[in-house]
Image: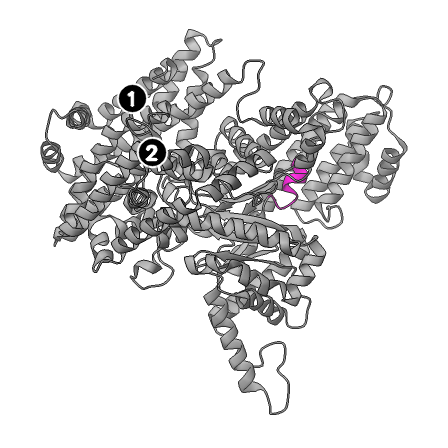
Amino acid sequence: MPPPLRRDVRLLGELLGSVLAEYGGPELLADVERLRHAVIAARRGEVEDDEVAALVNGWPLERAELVARAFTVYFHLVNLAEEHQRIRTLRERDSGDAPLRESLAATVEEIRAEQGERRLRDLLDGLELHPVLTAHPTEARRRAVVAAIQRVSGLLERLDDPRRSATEEAETHRRLLEEIDVLWRTAQLRSARLDPLDEVRTAMGVFDGTLFRVVPTIYRALDTALAPDDAGRRPPRAPSFLRFGSWIGGDRDGNPHVTAKITREALGIQADHVLRALEVATTGIGRRLTAHESTAPPDPDLRRALTAAEAAHPERLAEIVKRSPGEPHRQVLLYAAERIRATRERDADLAYRRAEELLADLRLVQDSLARAGVARQAYGELQHLIWQVETFGFHLAELEIRQHSAAHDRALAELRADAARAKPAGVSEPTGSSDQAGPSEQTEEVLATFRVIAALQERFGVDACHRYVVSFTRSADDVAAVYELAERALDGSPPPVLDVVPLFETGEDLARVPEILDGMLRLEPVRRRLEGTGRRLEVMLGYSDSTKELGPVTATLRLYDAQAELAAWAARRGVRLTLFHGRGGALGRGGGPANRAVLAQAPGSVAGGFKVTEQGEVIFARYGQPAIARRHVEQVASAVLLAATPAVEERAAAAAARFRDLAATMDAAGYAAYRELVETEGFAEWFGLVSPLEEISGLRIGSRPARRTATRDLADLRAIPWVFAWSQMRLNLPGWYGLGSGLDAVDDVEALREAYREWPLLASLLDNAEMSLAKTDRHIAARYLSLGDRSDLTEKVLAEYDKTAGLVLAVTGHSRLLENRRVLSQAVELRNPYVDALSYLQLRALTAMRAGVADEAERARLEGLLLLTVNGVAAGLQNTG
């Protein structure tokens, strides 16, 4: 362990120990230490698992809860220490002359050297990275807990300051103890379920704290890499390639809590945050830009703008001029800040109508400064502000709507039936419904959504809300239904501008993608949009549900085939295709390192653009700290640039062709093994017994229900609780099950090793599975599986685990899991005993609940213990669903 990390872990652990002793006396700290030593000894084979279980089972429930809370808080602190160490490492690696590996600077250097300046420019012109934040319920921590951890983070950073005095260090220690005490006393579990607007506000914390400030630094890094000698003194060469989207408050698929009213309010909250940020930034730059007109004479355009402002709002401008006499550039910026505030407050007389108007004012100032020879002021912080406006606009992130195709079917069937009953003989069907009783509540909500989209476009512009994602798209009729519903909803008024995005999630639908898209192109509304967008079309691929249905091997290979088919289809049809990757955070839902995932895509499917969902805990993990957020974005953007280069595309195409038969063998065997398991009679009931599946909903970590409908069918279970429950059991089954059978069917380890070396897709599949296997604990998992009293299913799962682990090691050439990833391997090994402690506590609660508890008070206490351990295990493994 690096010395600074060891210091932080030891310090935070000691401070937590002091808090425990103060709260519960030395006996509480002794019990925590007793369990810690026991699980470490069990890992070493010095004590039996049953002895650890006996220790945990011997405590009163109140004591068990406190011990579980201690380990949960400990993981929050260790995660924080590891995050700080990652930031230290990034800074150390970025301290030399050579650019940091996988940075934009390194990628620019590589592409320029191999392909020349013109190709580099072409790639940059087409570059677009589009993260879409979603409210998928995978962030188990309360906002109050996250806030407390962030305060500890700020204090921990002070200890790295070599300038600190002894007095400052002592004060920092005192404050750390105070904040850890608050973290300990803060309830780890939510008492009420989040509503969608809570989820919106949680995401705004990432924007306020990180994204708004980090985005221009990323562009600046790219701009400097392109032409370092005069960076900051010339017009920028770096494009503003980032655009953010959001489903939070727009995703109503299976979530009755997301209504048209919520969607309207969600975008209003977003706009409020971005407008406040822009106002503060514009005011700050304006106040600092004190260049006098004698040293920075304004050009005629800027003078005309000031004259126009004086004519429109003489009193406001007079006040500004009084505060900044002889500083015309400053005056224009301070006036712009007032207009931004008026936009937020909806003061129509002064407000900007669109972000483009603000951009025009900022560029007016920039051009005037440049003409006056004040280049550093023109292309410094003012350029950062321009990049921020280009990236976020007045809406921050495009709010996307998602709904299930079945909801549209029901609404249209009702509207058409009502119209048919109301239509006199010989009269053509009207555009809107004629039923005097009006549509049902569910159908009215579908129609209201389209009216809200139209209203949002009127207020914020089309870019603020125009994508409509259709879950479980089965045919072009599902796309046509959206346009028909929009026409009916507006009832004669112009419908909103819509780009309908089909989402393909099942194996059957993935196989029919080209056929469905051909049907889309025959739809008149789609043809009109293609003409208006330069033949741009977006298609979404769902990783979560496809992996849950098909297993990790088949889902990975079929999604790759679908990408390749889509790229070829787009080339044939002259369509500029954007693939939207619906990846989850967990490995069992398409997660894993995003930059490596980009490089593993089918040739031609990236084409300079990458759009992907960022879900739950992943949002905070990737964007919660400025240094980590910048590193993540640079890695992914670099991968997107490289993925479009001939060398990468040719290598991937050659490998896919060469190993096609091998992949087909793995596909067939992996799929058969996975489906045999989940289709075993009684599997769903068994899974409910051996896992905390049903209890997980008690965490209240999101507004969305765990199932789309009220049925208890496994197919209706959402992918997140499916993955979450397996991770709690320490099995992580969705990330690896069937891979061992697939590899075994090939029966040629040398061929598999060659494919692993040469084909990025197979390397990504095996590396991600290896990570899932490393976070799996066979002994702990076996104790969970025994709760179901189905030895056949237990043996099947453990046999596949043994087969998969053995063959993954054989193919990768590793002697142990994660052998080539020392830092990650060490982190997993150090964490495992502490996660074991929480697993034994969880097993105590789960075993008692499965046996049946008559006393309601005792059952409630057991549920509390179980949910607390679920939260702690999620923190320890650093993933939920």
**Horizontal and vertical percent for residue 472?**
46, 60
Q: Which residues are magenta?
A: 388-396
The answer to whether 777 is drawn above or below residue 542 in the figure is above
From mark 2 to mark 1, how far is it between C-alphas? Answer: 39 Å
Give residue 231's quadrant in the image.
top right
Mark 1 burial class by Cα count in 10 Å: few <14, some 14-19, many 20+: some
Residue at x 17%, y 22% (from the top left corner): 26
**Horizontal and vertical percent for residue 849?**
16, 50
Task: Decide whether residue 646 is among the magenta residues.
Answer: no
Which numbered disc, 2 or 1, marks the residue that appears first in the sequence?
1
Residue underneath mark 2: 811
Mark 1: which amino acid?
Gly
Mark 2: which amino acid?
Val
Give residue 287's quadrant in the image.
top right
Residue underneath mark 1: 13
Asked if one can make out residue 612 in the rendered structure from this viewpoint, the answer is yes
